Amino acid sequence: MTALTGGGPALLFARTKVTRDDQRVFVAKLAALAVLTAVGVVLALRPELPLVAVGVVILAAMYTHAVELQHQCLHHSAFRRPWPHRLAGVPLGLPLMVVYSHYRLRHLQHHRYLGTPQDTEFFGFDTRAPLTVSHLVRGLLDYRRLASVLWEVLLAATGRWTYGFGAVSPAMRRRIVVDHLVLGGAVLAALGVAVAGYGQYPLRLWVLPLLLAVPLHFLVELPEHVLCDTDSTDVLRNTRSIRGSRLSTWFTNGNNLHIEHHAAMSVPINLLPGRHEETRRHAVHVERTYADFYRTLWAALRRPHGRGEA
């Protein structure tokens, strides 16, 4: 971590607790998610195919946004007390089949070990591998993750689930197993609705949006560390921030300000924009917009071996 003396980015690494105002901001985000999801549901169930398509797109976007809200819950930076984070985090991950407690365990290890071989980022795209078009396409269409999650649900239901990235406490293991079983219950409920003759409901409200949300979520997550110095443990070198717009900052729930987040991961997301100027002054990988990042990515893909500095 960069030193805080000699003009270093002191504000960037400063910690702060969740206040009542921060909590109200997050609750407002949950309310907006609920309203927009309801709009998507109404449109997806209309008889007109164009409206169905719009509804499916809205639902895919909201399922992606929900995982970004879940990410804030992982860090216990949404509510003033710890217990509501899991209460909100479990359902936020269900549409995209992201198991809250499992995600939390691996993601916190990702923060601890970023820049080392022990990095355990939850989603499978390896930013340290050679960057090629085929590698990106596999990450974009990573439907294998959905199959692996269902397999882990089966393991949890039969008492055979184990953690493959180190030791885990019995209490954490119980939470992870329970969260897998919650997802399994949701899948069984959807199958039951389909078997009962109402298959259009899970198809339009879950399956089709999920298939679209997988690549959409990949595009949100990709800029975090790709083309950065992934052999460094310095967050000012191994992570990227994108200033973005108010819309992209809302949709990604501040995931665009990823250096700011890694520098102080327990800081409420709504406070990160106030730290971006320090990031611009001290960090290596800072983009103005997502379009700028994807232009940088395209240029890197065209270079030999698909590598290079951003």
Image: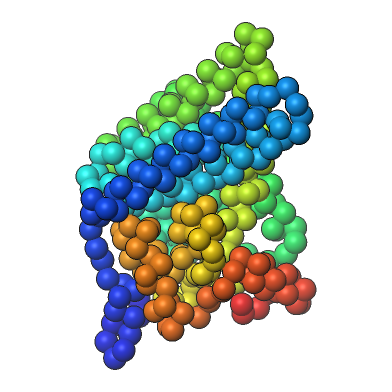
Residue at point 50%, 24% (across, down):
186
Query: Quadrant location of the C terminus?
Result: bottom right
Colouring method of the image: rainbow
* Above or below, comparing residue 196 to residue 301 in the picture: above
* Above or below, comparing residue 105 to residue 146 in the picture: below
Nearer to me, 105 or 244: 244
**Residue at the extreme bottom of the image, as rendered:** 6
* Above or below, comparing residue 96 to residue 280 in the picture: above
- The x and y percentages for residue 110 are 42, 58
Q: Is residue 148 in view?
A: no
Residue at point 48%, 45% (across, down):
67
Residue at point 62%, 79% (across, down):
309
Query: Quadrant location of the N terminus?
Result: bottom left
Q: Is residue 286 in view?
A: yes
Nearer to me, 247 or 182: 247
- The x and y percentages for residue 299 are 73, 74
Residue at point 53%, 18% (across, down):
189
- The x and y percentages for residue 173 are 34, 37
**Residue at the extreme top of the image, as rendered:** 196
Number of numbered discs overlaid on the protein picture: 0
Which of the 4 image quadrants contains residue 223?
bottom right
Left or right of residue 76, residue 241 in this image: right
- The x and y percentages for residue 37 are 53, 35
Left or right of residue 156, residue 82 in this image: left
Which of the 4 image quadrants contains residue 222?
bottom right
Which of the 4 image quadrants contains residue 211?
top right
Nearer to me, 209 or 154: 209
* Above or below, comparing residue 261 to residue 71 in the picture: below
